[in-house]
């Protein structure tokens, strides 16, 4: 049973470019979470999605960031017009059940974004 | 709002000794879960142990145990018989219930553990 897959593992973008980060949840999981880890810090929640729905985006910056989890295909975290402060590790996690049910979140290996 | 506090930025322990990593939390939610994750230098997040707020017994997983003191709002991780491979960053995290943010995890700032010969 494959774990949570993220790609690319490393991404380099110049300031002003777009970054697209992909996450394929574990088989059977329909809930995806994105977290960001800035250098020397803990992980910070960004967004929680179910298939075709954004459930909680309270941690998303108001501009340039968006996320989707379509009916088919991986979840995408999109960062437009990247700036140096976006350089971080972006982790995706998935779980099998809905809000209120306590199940483990399984983390992917992360995507390390470097903005030059 | 939920908050996790890890007051030890770095810890050293001798190989084969036990070590306790501190974690305190704050929440108004009566139902919550507490997690510990390990992040080695390679960067992935490895789940170690989980404690539910209504669990009567302290959680244990192999060499890991969670010292859960609900009244003090603490959830310290105890690693017994430390090994060199335990050297890593350790994060405490909390998940709230219906009123505390649902399934999203709130993380502490982490403790860097180094195991020495």
Image (cartoon, rainbow, N blue to C red):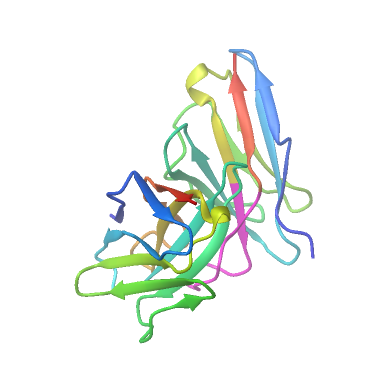
The residue sitting at 26% across, 74% down in the picture is B69
Extreme residue in the bottom direction = B56
Rendered position, B78 above or below A47: below
The residue sitting at 42% across, 64% down in the picture is B17
Image-based side of B97 in relation to A60, left or right: left
- Examine the residues drawn in magenta and state their main secondary structure: loop
> Quadrant of the rendered structure where residue A20 is?
top right
- Span of residues in magenta: A92-108
Rendered position, A69 above or below A96: above
x%, y% of residue A104?
Answer: 55, 67
Rendered position, A12 above or below B44: above
The residue sitting at 35% across, 82% down in the picture is B54
Q: Tell me if residue A15 can be seen.
A: yes
Extreme residue in the left direction = B71
Quick one: quadrant of the N terminus of chain B? bottom left
x%, y% of residue A99?
Answer: 50, 67
């Amino acid at each position: 049973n494959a774990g949570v897959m993220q790609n690319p593992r490393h991404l380099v973008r110049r300031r002003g470019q777009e970054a697209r980060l992909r996450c394929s949840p574990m088989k059977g999981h329909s809930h995806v979470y994105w977290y960001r880890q800035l250098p020397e810090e803990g992980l910070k929640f960004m967004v929680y999605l179910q298939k075709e729905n954004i459930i909680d985006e309270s941690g998303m910056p108001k501009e340039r960031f968006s996320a989707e989890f379509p009916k088919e295909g991986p979840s995408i975290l999109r960062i437009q017009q990247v700036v140096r402060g976006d350089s971080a590790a972006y982790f995706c996690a998935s779980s099998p059940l809905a809000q209120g049910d306590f199940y483990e979140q399984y983390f992917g290996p992360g995507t390390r974004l470097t903005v030059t | 709002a939920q908050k996790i506090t890890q007051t030890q930025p770095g810890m050293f322990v001798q190989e084969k000794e036990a070590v306790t990593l501190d974690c305190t939390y704050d929440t108004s939610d009566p139902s919550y879960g507490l997690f510990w994750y390990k992040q080695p230098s390679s960067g992935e997040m490895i789940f170690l142990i989980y404690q539910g707020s209504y669990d009567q017994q302290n959680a244990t997983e192999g060499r890991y145990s969670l010292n859960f003191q609900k009244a003090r709002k603490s959830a310290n991780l105890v690693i017994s018989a430390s090994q060199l491979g335990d050297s890593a960053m350790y994060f405490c995290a909390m998940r709230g219930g219906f009123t505390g943010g649902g399934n999203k995890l709130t993380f502490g700032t982490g403790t860097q553990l180094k195991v020495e010969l």
